[in-house]
Image (spheres, grey):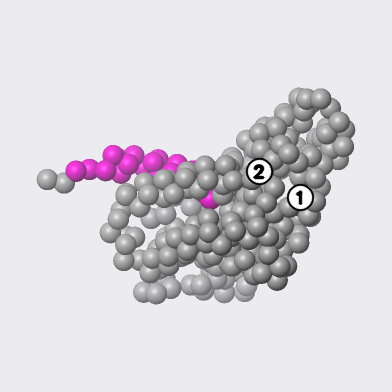
Amino acid sequence: MLIQNPLNSSEWSFPILECFHIAGFAVAIGTVAIVDFRLLGLGMRRQTPGQLTKDTALLTIISLIVAVFSGLLIFSTDPDKYYLNLAFLFKIACLLLAIGFHYTIHRKVVFSGASLGASMLVACVSLVLWVSVIFGGIFIAFESLTFG
Amino acid sequence: MPIVASFARWLETRDWAMDFAGSAYFYPIVLATHLTCIAIFGGMILITNLRLLGWVLRSQSISDVVRRLRPWKWGGLVLMVTCGVLLAGSEAGKYYGNPYFWTKLTLLALLIVHSLVFRRSVYQNTAELDRAAVIPSRAKLAAALSLILWISVVVAGRMIGYYEGPTSLAGPASAAEALGR
């Protein structure tokens, strides 16, 4: 017997989840972007990248958790729609890369310092990965238009 | 509002709007850029407000957070609004009949009022806020209102895509409808 996902019983659950998802990734990517801007020598230049990361790390992780969990719930409403969707797979690949990069190489460069060139490269890779996650997410809904 | 309706009709029949609405790639790319701006620059707005509330970035002065991020927030806002105008303009007839769209515009108008009201006492007055022993309540009020308004803008914006009303001017089925289906 099939078990109904309770999220599918209300037409409001999907948009509400999406709002949490958007607010979550806005804060997560916004905080990461502040650090990346700093690595590029822009924005809050009076602080070190390490200071900025220390101050924003908690906010980044909490909002990332909100975005990921709301995302998992959105996924659960119609898994069949997502798991074969190229844009979705692209998004998840970029997300895993972005998270992995953020807590390894990015972290190392932020806290132990690197040459300006290396810092800028790391900031660009980070920004490109996170922005790719958003683009992948938007294209999930448009896949039939673009790949179909 | 017949003038607004005919303007909406005029707008959506412009060449650029028709090309735009007819292109499979353009709409999602502009939408994704709009969302990217919300993430990067909207995130900065959120953080500025959370700093005014004294919740994050406490090791940094309010002046630094507000002033250093200001040019980026302005740049992001311009890009975000440009994308928004392209999105709405390409399907103006549909947006005209959408109550969430008008809710969003009203909220954005309130944000302009908000920035004018608190400009002098909070956003241009950060040095004094930093000197105060505790963050003055008018700064916290400004931050709380800004947070509420911006979150409401995001929610109203998201709801635009869900509205299927009878009052919409007849228009072609569009990419926007595919979103969230």
Quarter of the image where the C terminus of chain A is located: bottom left
**x and y percentages locating residue B5 in the rendered image:** 62, 54
> Which residue occupies 34% across, 60% down?
A82
What's the residue at 53%, 50% (across, down)? A25
Question: Total number of numbered labels?
Answer: 2
Mark 2: secondary structure: helix
Q: Nearer the viewer, residue A108 or B89?
A: A108
Q: Residue furthest front?
A: A112
Q: The disc numbered 2 marks a residue on which chain?
A: A
Q: Determine which quarter of the picture holds residue A108.
A: bottom right
**What residue is at 16 percent from the left and 46 percent from the top?**
A2
Q: Residue A11: name its quadrant.
A: top left
Q: Tell me the number on the disc at residue B2.
A: none
A12 is within the stretch colored magenta: yes
Density class for disc 1 (Cα within 10 Å; few <14, some 14-19, many ≥20) is some
Local SS, label 1: loop
* Residue B107 seen from this side: no
Image quadrant containing the N terminus of chain A: top left
Q: Position of residue B22 (x, y in %)?
A: 51, 72
Magenta span of residues: A3-25
Where residue A131 appears, x then y in whole percent? 56, 62
- When the figure is inspected, residue B14 is found, relative to residue B7, above or below; the finding is below
Task: Residue type at mark 2: give it.
Answer: Asp
* Residue ID for mark 2: A55
List the residue tagged with mark 1. Answer: A47
Q: Crowdedness of circle 2 by 10 Å Cα count: few (<14), some, many (20+)?
A: some
